Amino acid sequence: MVAYARMEKLILIDGTGLIFRGFYAIPPYFKNKEGVQTNAVFGFTSIILSILEQYKPTHMGIAFDVRGKTFRHEAYTEYKATRVAAPDELYSQIPLCKEIVDAFEIPKFELEGYEADDVIATIVKKVGSRQGLQTLIATGDFDLFQLVTDRASILYPTKGFRGAEIMDREKIFEKYGIFPEQVCDYKALAGDSSDNIPGVRGIGPKGAKKLLDDFQTLEKIYENIDAINGATKTKLEDSKENAFMSKRLCILDEDSPVPFDIEACRVHEFNAARVREDFVKLNFNSLLRRLEVLYPEVRGAEKQKPAPQEEKQASLF
């Protein structure tokens, strides 16, 4: 009998996206004893715990955006120009989220001039040929769906932050009517108001899906433009430049210069006392109970951080 090695599992977390998701999904009255708003941190931390509880990854990494312009702003100065700035109450919680990540000793990935999506895309490409490794991308960002292959799937958080749906190629088509490799073609046609990507003026989601059903890609649509009639043809001709520019903006950079070592992402012991201290400081009582069930070592850790040689450890896996 052949003994097959157990499949390893890398979970890449869209840190910035999930922080925003937590901020707008969790009521703003979540505060610690000092009155610091913590709703985004609570939602973000709850997702991390759910991932650890349910999926038990062998490797983990979390990517964050770096504030400032990216190469997409250089290509299109109006990129994200219509997006309303997030409130200070959200940005003030990002350092607290990163403290949680550091407490669990999960590697962080950030790169100036690139979005977290590009960083994740680069890592997915780098691990794509590694045998016996399954990749899950924890995100609610539609752009990252373009990375789905037979080796990588989306871990889409559900309402309440206690579960997630694994989205593979077939499920994405079932839910959205397009395949992962058509995500950027779709946005090239329908546009994206949240990122201020123009697309083709006058063509919406329904029209974009119909065109992709018929021609599969943006390039093939324009190669067969004479087979398209009426107003749709006129709209495509009038917005051709915008359509191709929109597609370029959507395509993630899989070759960003982000340093990455898969073995550095292997889950390992973390400082149980430090994690407990952070949860207590944030008044995350319900999350602390979940953490103690998952890692009994945390329950026995002193609330005050002990001397280094006395620190109790807990393992992420």
Image: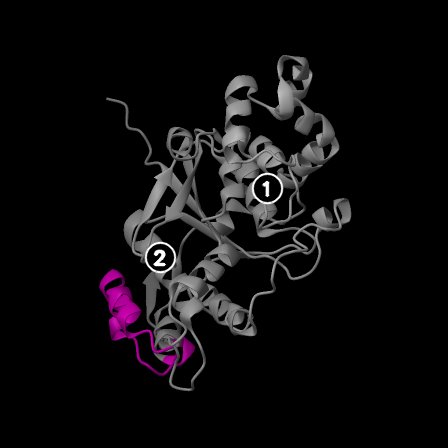
**SS for callout 1:** helix
At label 1, counting other C-alpha atoms closer than 10 Å, the crowd grade (few under 14, some 14-19, many 20 or more) is: many
Foreground label between 1 and 2: 1
Asked whether residue 78 is drawn in magenta, I would say: no
Number of numbered callouts drawn: 2
> Residue 190 or 257: which is nearer the viewer?
190
What residue lies at 42% left-to-right and 76% top-to-bottom? Answer: 308
Q: Magenta part of the protein: which range? A: 281-309
Q: Is residue 95 above or below residue 145?
A: below
Q: Is residue 212 above or below residue 90?
A: above
Q: Which residue is mark 2?
A: 316
Q: Is residue 212 above or below residue 286?
A: above
Q: Which residue is mark 1?
A: 122
> Residue 118 or 104: which is nearer the viewer?
118
What residue lies at 42% left-to-right and 30% top-to-bottom? Answer: 173
Q: Quadrant of residue 297?
A: bottom left
Amino acid of disc 1? Thr
Q: Residue furthest front?
A: 230
Residue 63: x and y, percent?
A: 54, 54
What residue lies at 47% left-to-right and 28% top-to-bottom? Answer: 179
Left or right? Give the position of 37 relative to 273.
Answer: right
Residue 310: x and y, percent?
A: 35, 77
Looking at marks 1 and 2 on the same chain, the residue that comes earlier in the sequence is marked by: 1
What residue lies at 28% left-to-right and 50% top-to-bottom? Answer: 54
Distance of label 1 from label 2 (alpha carbons)? 25 Å
Q: Which mark is residue 31?
A: none
Q: Quadrant of residue 249?
A: top right
Left or right? Give the position of 236 relative to 312.
Answer: right
Residue 237: x and y, percent?
A: 72, 26
Amino acid of disc 2? Leu
**SS for callout 2:** loop
| Residue 253 visible in the displayed image | no
